[in-house]
Image (cartoon, rainbow, N blue to C red):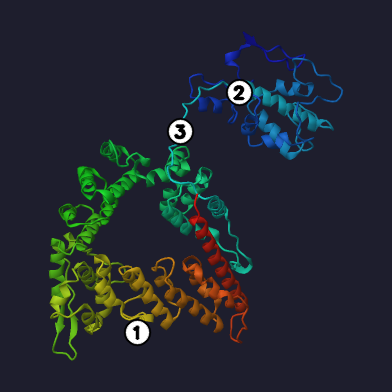
Amino acid sequence: MTRTPAPTDPSAPAPTPVPWPSVVPTGSPPTDATAPPAQRRADSGTGAGTGPGTDADTAGSSPGADAVAGSGTGARSAPPTVAGAQPVPGRLPAASSAHASGSGPGVWEELVTSALLGTDRRTPPGGERGPGAAAALLDAAAAETVRRRAGLRPARAARRPDPAPEDPRPPLPEAAARRLTMLLTDRPGTAGGGRRGSAPDLMELLPQWLATANARGFAAPPQTLPALLDAARGRTDLRPAALKFAGPRALWLARFNPDWRFALRATPGGGTASPGSGATERARRLWAEGLFAERVALLAALRARDAVGARELLASTWATERAEDRLMFLDSLRTGLEAADEPFLEQALADRSRNVRATAAELLSALPRSALAARMAARAATCVSLDRTRTPPAIVVEAPHECDAGMERDGVVAKPPAGRGERSWWFGQLTEAAPLATWPARFAGRTAEEIVALPVSDGWQGELHAAWCRAAVRQRDGVWARALLGAPTAPDAGGPGAVSLAERAKLLGTLGAGERAEWVAGFIATHGLSEAFQLLGMCGVPWATPLGRAVVDALNIARDAGSYPWSFSGVMGLAERCLDPSEAGRLDGLLAIPDEPEDASPGAGGYWAEAFQRLVTTLRLRAAMAEELRAGP
């Protein structure tokens, strides 16, 4: 059976019949029957569509299709004819006859251009200027659309994907599901003058909501999975909690969208390397054939549950890995670092990459009983001594005069950064790598507090104490961390001192949550909020009651003093996320606009009232969120 297109013009030669299976648009290059379905559709000049006559075909055929369809007299259900012409059965409308005779690859683009510019400025192809030009344009577009659709060839149906796995967790309560939708769709705006306004920033509450939902063991509603994956794609800090809450269905969905491939990389093997039958073989196959990011994620996950297996897997291909890959793989050994890792790390000290050697040395120095720690302790002890001839006794530092090959092999970087002296650079690296147990024996049995209190001669105190801070953080030594932190009420605790605020924040990380909050509360009560932002970031959520009240009191004092309000916006933002919601009632008295002192910043009172209003609203919203998640399914 053959199919012949309708004649386009009485004077034009009759078109040659074309067999139906090979029908292609007139003037368009023929499609290749052997090409893949996606390519055949692209070659035919149309966009995505499921079959002739669908809206998707027209919408996808050209960026200007909507412009053509919407020009002139508006949407029409059938191609109109020119005024006075009678449609002939089986033939195209007269208005499109001239157009059809001139069909070609660029005709559609010319029609789009005429529609965008207007028929008065650009005559449609095969048409004439005049009152009927717009209708003729629509007729020509309709005929061109039919012609383009006629050239589509049906593609083979793709294999239906496997169903998404079941999520056995209980469903999210209805109120909590509505709240999640609000959190995911919130787009906070900026009020005039750069002020945040009094409305809560819902996206900033999403991490806390996810943590609570995961703790309760709820499953994500299926309809929220795309928004969850989009949110996690845009914010890497959300990914662990978001992917845990999204569950196995999110991994199934991520395989169909390249934008969500991060979910497959974050989960080893996209969920294929989980424990169970054949897990070891799947893990080895992924390690041998997977992408770099997948291998890093696999190693980290395996390390968390099987440190020996992870180390053996890494050792099996270590010699053939690239230097930058070896560095990333080695970093995964920080999780569950143990004495059994020492032989492998000792071999890594001879690596040809300086960065790999330095990382291996850092890990070995975190093992106080390792051979490297002993070597570093011997070197550092020769640089630090106690001068008992002084009153009181003082610590004397004699920094190394050279960086020998043994030091370099043990991870000491010979070349200092710009602006740093060589000897102080070498000394700091030796001291931070030495076990802290070295120093009580070196200083006649003195405790960590007593050693830190000793004066240090010749201006070496800052360098020595900074190295001890790094050692305390690396070795997770709370005793030395407390000694170096000192009392939060000490006069020098609020200044630069021998230990900077950044170093204090890291030292706080070695302490328990309660002790950490207590120290920061004492610091704020004594020194205020101007230097407390980094320290507050180390405290657990929600803040302990003494810490929360110290922050609110300090904010109130700053408001009454007429302080510049925008300098406390960071602390206020932390308070919105970290203050215990039960404290909202205590803040009601701060919502009024205070009287502004003469030397106060203009408009400061209004800003403070607005900020406290946002804080109270956010705390009550957090309380409502927690209540919704406590409800049963």
Marks 2 and 3, how far apart at CA: 40 Å
Residue 466 showing in the rendered view: no
Which residue does the numbered mark 1 point to in the structure image? 490
Query: Which amino acid does the dot numbered 2 rest on?
Result: Ser
| 452 left or right of 535 in image | left
Percent coordinates x, y for residue 557 in the rendering:
51, 82
Q: Earlier in the sequence, mark 3 or mark 1?
A: 3
Q: What residue type is labelled 1?
A: Ala
Q: What element carries label 1?
A: loop
Q: Residue most toward the top?
A: 1
The answer to whether any part of residue 98 appears in the image is yes
For the point 48% across and 26% down, which residue is it? 158
- The number of discs equals 3
- The residue singled out by tag 3 in the image is 163
Give the x, y percent position of residue 107. 67, 28
Above/below status of 89 relative to 124: above
> Which image quadrant is residue 119 in?
top right
Rounded to the nearest whole Å, what is the CA distance between mark 2 and mark 1? 84 Å
Residue appearing at x 83%, y 19% in the figure:
86
Instruction: Find the residue positioned furthest to the bottom.
Output: 391
Alpha-carbon distance for marks 3 and 1? 63 Å
Viewer-nearest of labels 3 and 1? 3
Residue hosting label 2:
28
